[in-house]
Image (cartoon, helix red, strand yellow):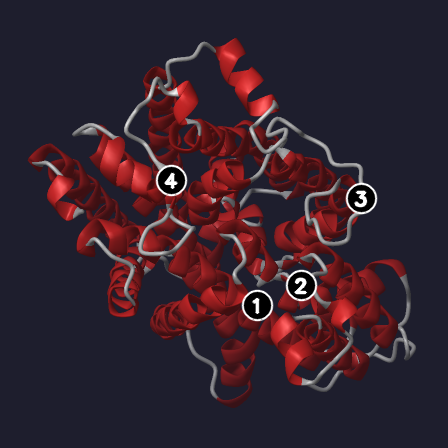
């Protein structure tokens, strides 16, 4: 399929890469002098830049590729997750962000050191790192699918691996020297790129479909199979649909509370503002702006349904059912469309949008995991044995970033086989892998925020219990241990509710007995 790329397309891609490397080079003149500057930008970042960066890292590659896939397969119920996102943003802005700023933390897990001990802080940090490897690896895998199709015209394992490695190098080039500051500004630029490219695709699709808006709505409201693709809310009591309304008010809201307030990947951005009010404003704005952005990507998928699946509406166009698959995989309809239907120039622009979304995700994972490794693990150990100056910890952050990059690369390879086995749509897969870490973290932090109970040991056991409770609900584990079949098919949102409930009960077992030993 690379043969369909024109010189103009390759020039646009090359121009983007030059811009990316240029931004990384420009920030080398603003080298960080200490760990706070490297990981938190000296708490001097404008709230509006932070807001855009939060959107870029929470949506990015998963939404760019998974959103159209969701719209193509289903309806608009995924758009309703923004209800949970807005509720979660208000909770985090009111409850968690003021606490983090009051304690002047670099990572969100330092709150547990204040309440219990360094050991509890490290346990939560370790669980975050495990979860972020899962989530970051899955997003890298999704983006590698697109890049593999662009570069190699296939999605064979060896080419997915090669594409993932290229993306890791691109992300590393932006964030290595200047840390979070360069990430936030590059996120801002990349958000503009992939949003504009998505708008361009939507316009081109509307122009290609020989229907007016009213006719398009009518076609989507009543498909030949009887599906209403315009459905926004699903009020059924359905435990297998993660986007049913009851699931949005429970599991989706919990998911976003964890993502906004307990996941260093997102929360680190909020901590770069000057104070808690600016951080809270950035979070709420990002949750609101995400609504039209998600609508945009789902709508692309809806129009792809008409373009490929409704030949009676396309005036007998050449589109057929074969276009729904790429080498047997029903997961790349958007990339198939990009590479086969878009005109020269626009094809290159949208390809750049895919890569920009991916790089935004990778940047954030590299820096946030590095901050936890250095601030919550390495710094306490180093200062206990032989204190070093701040530049030492900046270098340690850069070194750990390389290790994290290799870990994400390895996890992307695992996700290639994992997603094939699970058979989940791209978006569901990317969201579901986050549940493993979030269950325990939510149980622990709800205990800290709303009770006087818990201890270092119960925190550790709760984190493990949340992870194992989620693992026990996976179909491959149910089959392996011959667990009840009715456990199968439970949506990841309910898996999160169950895991959080179990972790909370475990954490509540003991009373608060702060152990000052690390």
Q: Earlier in the sequence, mark 4 or mark 1?
A: 1
Q: Secondary structure at mark 4?
A: helix
Residue shown at 60% from the left, 59% from the top: 432
Q: Are dots 3 and 4 in contact, CB under 8 Å?
A: no
Left or right of 362? Residue 253 is right
Dividing the picture into quadrants, the one containing residue 289 is top right
Residue shown at 76% from the left, 47% from the top: 247
Residue 101, image x and y in percent? 66, 51
The Cα atoms of the two marked residues, 1 and 3, are separated by 25 Å
The Cα atoms of the two marked residues, 3 and 4, are separated by 35 Å
Q: Secondary structure at mark 3?
A: helix
The answer to which of 505 and 508 lies nearer the viewer is: 505
Q: Are dots 2 and 1 in contact, CB under 8 Å?
A: yes
Left or right of 505? Residue 302 is left
Dividing the picture into quadrants, the one containing residue 128 is bottom right
Q: Of all residues shown, which one is farthest toward the bottom?
A: 385
The Cα atoms of the two marked residues, 3 and 2, are separated by 19 Å
Frontmost of labels 4 and 1 is: 4
Where is mark 1, residue-wise? 131
Callout 3: few (<14), some (14-19), or many (20+) C-alpha neighbours within 10 Å?
some
Dividing the picture into quadrants, the one containing residue 337 is top left
Q: Secondary structure at mark 1?
A: helix
The Cα atoms of the two marked residues, 4 and 1, are separated by 37 Å
Where is mark 4, residue-wise? 321
Relative to 291, residue 456 above or below = below
The Cα atoms of the two marked residues, 2 and 1, are separated by 7 Å
Residue 452, image x and y in percent? 91, 67
**Can residue 175 be seen in this snapshot?**
yes
Where is mark 2, residue-wise? 438
Where is mark 3, residue-wise? 246
Q: Earlier in the sequence, mark 2 or mark 4?
A: 4
Q: Are dots 3 and 2 in contact, CB under 8 Å?
A: no
């Amino acid at each position: 399929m690379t043969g369909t790329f024109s010189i103009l397309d390759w020039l646009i891609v090359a121009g983007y890469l030059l811009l990316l490397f240029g931004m990384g080079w420009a920030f080398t003149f603003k080298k960080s002098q200490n760990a706070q500057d490297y990981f938190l930008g000296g708490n001097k970042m404008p709230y509006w830049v932070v807001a855009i960066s939060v959107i870029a890292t929470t949506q990015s590659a998963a939404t760019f590729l998974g959103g159209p896939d969701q719209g193509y397969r289903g309806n608009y119920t995924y758009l309703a997750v923004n209800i949970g996102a807005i509720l979660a943003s208000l909770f985090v802005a009111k409850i968690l962000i003021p606490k983090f700023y009051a304690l002047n933390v670099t990572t969100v897990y330092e709150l547990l050191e204040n309440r219990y001990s360094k050991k509890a802080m490290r346990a939560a940090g370790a669980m975050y790192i495990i979860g972020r490897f899962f989530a970051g690896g899955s997003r890298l895998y999704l983006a590698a699918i697109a890049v593999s199709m662009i570069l190699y015209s296939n999605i064979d394992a060896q080419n997915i691996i090669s594409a993932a490695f290229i993306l890791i190098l691109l992300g590393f080039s932006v964030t290595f020297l200047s840390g979070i500051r360069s990430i936030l500004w590059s996120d801002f630029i990349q958000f503009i790129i992939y949003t504009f490219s998505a708008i361009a695709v939507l316009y081109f699709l509307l122009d290609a479909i020989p229907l007016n808006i009213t006719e398009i709505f009518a076609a989507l409201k009543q498909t030949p199979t009887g599906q209403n693709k315009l459905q926004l809310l699903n009020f059924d009591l359905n435990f297998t649909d993660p986007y049913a309304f009851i699931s949005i008010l429970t599991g989706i809201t919990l998911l976003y509370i964890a993502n906004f307030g307990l996941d260093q990947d997102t929360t680190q951005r909020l901590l770069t503002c000057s104070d808690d009010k600016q951080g809270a404003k950035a979070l709420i704005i990002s949750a609101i702006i995400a609504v039209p952005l998600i609508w945009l990507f789902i709508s692309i998928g809806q129009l792809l349904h008409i373009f490929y699946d409704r030949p009676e509406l396309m005036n007998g166009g050449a589109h057929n059912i074969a276009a729904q698959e790429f080498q047997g995989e029903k997961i790349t309809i958007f990339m198939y469309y990009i590479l086969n239907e878009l005109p020269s120039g626009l094809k290159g622009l949208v390809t750049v949008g895919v890569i920009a979304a991916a790089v935004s995700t990778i940047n954030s994972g590299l820096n946030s995991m590095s901050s936890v490794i250095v601030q919550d693990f390495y710094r306490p150990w180093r200062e206990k044995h032989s204190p070093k100056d701040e530049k030492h910890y900046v270098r340690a952050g850069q070194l750990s970033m390389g290790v994290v990059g290799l870990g994400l690369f390895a996890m992307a390879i695992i996700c290639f086989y994992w997603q094939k086995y699970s058979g989940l749509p791209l978006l569901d897969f990317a969201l579901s892998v986050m549940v493993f870490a979030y269950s325990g973290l939510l149980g622990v932090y709800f205990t800290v925020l709303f009770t006087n109970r818990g201890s270092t040991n119960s925190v550790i056991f709760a984190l493990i219990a949340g992870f194992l409770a989620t693992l026990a609900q996976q179909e491959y584990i149910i089959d392996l241990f011959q667990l009840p079949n009715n456990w199968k098919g439970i949506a990841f949102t309910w898996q999160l509710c169950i895991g959080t409930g179990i972790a909370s009960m475990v954490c509540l077992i003991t009373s608060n007995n702060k152990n000052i030993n690390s």
